[in-house]
Amino acid sequence: MASGAGEWSAEQIDDYETLISTTDVELLKRAWRNEKASPEILPFEEALVKRAKEQIQLMEETVDDFAESGHDPLIASLYQMDLDRAQFLLRSYLRVRLQKIEKFMFHIWKMDTYRNRLSIEEEKFTERCIRDIGKYLEETVLSKLPDNYQSVLKQSIISEEDDMVPEPQLDTFVVAKCERATRPLYLDGSRQSASFDSSRDDHFQMVPGDLCILRYRPFQEELMSGNISLV
Amino acid sequence: MAGQSDPHISLFSAEEVEFMAEDELIEIVPNMRMDPLNFICGDFGPFLPQIASQVPLWLAVALKKRGKCAIRPPQWMSVENLTRVLEGERESQGAFQVLPFHYVEISRLLFDHAREDIPDMYMVRSLIEDIRDVRIHKVETSLEKFSGTSAVKIPNLSAMEVNIIRPFVGRALQAFYKHDNPEKIPDVDRASSAQTRAANNEPRRQLRR
């Protein structure tokens, strides 16, 4: 889009205004809530995590300075509290992701969509996890089973798919809050914006502030685009 | 894999819900002078005696604990407003009155840490308790009318109420969905009978741990 500033749509200005008025803590909190509530692993918020880390580090230095300079202990303790809250969010966010990886590691590893959602560190973690769990199961159980039943991924060699790999259940229900108006959506997952068929009564639309219980799968896209957030 | 997502991963604890509520802004009246605070979560202050200032609830409580400020209870926490809300809740069976998303947690924190700042504290507390009870009861009766669907709007429900009904409603709706669309849920466990699964909840998961 090479349009000048004068041609901004109302929506873009809206976006911009929420962007500058929203702190990284607020964004991190949203990312944390989404990650905690969604059944699958979401794209890693790389830029946000990097910024949060930098701010936390800066704040740690400030708090240390306060301690050394014998600053007002009240102010020092307040800054410490702010720091603790930001650290909690960041740690909890990263930890929830690790839990999901531990649970779905084989599935994440074989699906490119999921694998691309990991950070470099998380990718290393997944790889090591798979190696260690594979080795452990091999040594303790699988090597003692009959030949046909020794795969980590399959029940037996006649299984056509990897039927021993846990997958996230995308048809779970989540509670979501609408951030930006969504387009009408058919709940079977098909999205039709061009020829919207109002005779069908199974479409669903949300306006900002709406609170809903939703089946996760049809609303995946809305979550990724930030139109809804999970609570 | 069929079955529920792990509740330990997807549920918020009461403490976590409270943590989220502590970021809501509230008005305080400081009794001391303090420079602006440039926090990671935003800039607040400067603080001057007797000049009201907006701060997050956690900061308000921290200052209050040290006797550095008085907290101004939010408008919705007045006896008049709460009486009106309670009447509204009792009159309409279906709809919920408008209250802040975190009204339970905010009022709890204020009752615990700023009781002397709330006029008619006992009245306010019993009103909020009544409102909570009426609403929870309404949630429970409206759940009886739930049917299989993919999306339900739950206007004006609060964070704590959502958190209470989430495990049950989530599972119920999922069960409805599953029975309506047996072909859509790839159930690897279907071969093994429902009985085995009930007796030995998700047997394969156990092996993997």
Image: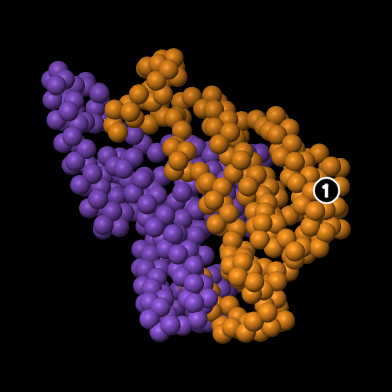
Chain colours: A purple, B orange
The quarter in which the C terminus of chain B is drawn is top left
Q: Quadrant of residue A56?
A: bottom left
Q: Is residue A156 left or right of residue A185?
A: left
Q: Looking at the image, is B139 positioned above or below residue B77? A: above
Q: Is residue B105 left or right of residue A20?
A: right
The answer to whether B110 is drawn above or below residue B137 in the figure is below
Q: Residue at x 77, y 52 (%)?
A: B125
**In screen coordinates, is B137 left or right of A17?**
right
Q: Depth check: give the residue in front, B189 or A51.
A: A51
Q: Nearer the viewer, residue B190 or B70?
A: B70
Which residue shows up at 66% across the image and 39% down it?
Answer: A201
Residue drawn at 40 percent across, 16 percent down? B196
Helix, strand or loop under label 1: helix
In this rendering, does residue A142 appear at all?
yes
Residue B185 locus on image (x, y percent): 44, 29
Q: What's the residue at 58%, 54% (across, down)?
A: B18
Q: A178 or A52, which lies in front?
A: A52
Q: Is residue A187 above or below residue A231?
A: above
> Which quadrant of the rendered structure holds the N terminus of chain B?
top left
In x, y percent, where is residue A218? Answer: 51, 43
Coordinates of residue A21 in the picture (x, y in percent): 56, 73
Left/right placement of residue B168 relative to residue A95 reads right
Q: Is residue A51 visible?
A: no
Q: Which residue is mark 1?
A: B86
Q: Please report, as a chain letter, where disc 1 is located.
A: B
The percent position of residue B179, horizontal first and vertical second, equals 54, 24
Disc 1: CA contacts within 10 A as few (<14), some (14-19) or many (>=20): many
Task: Identify the amino acid type marked 1.
Answer: Leu
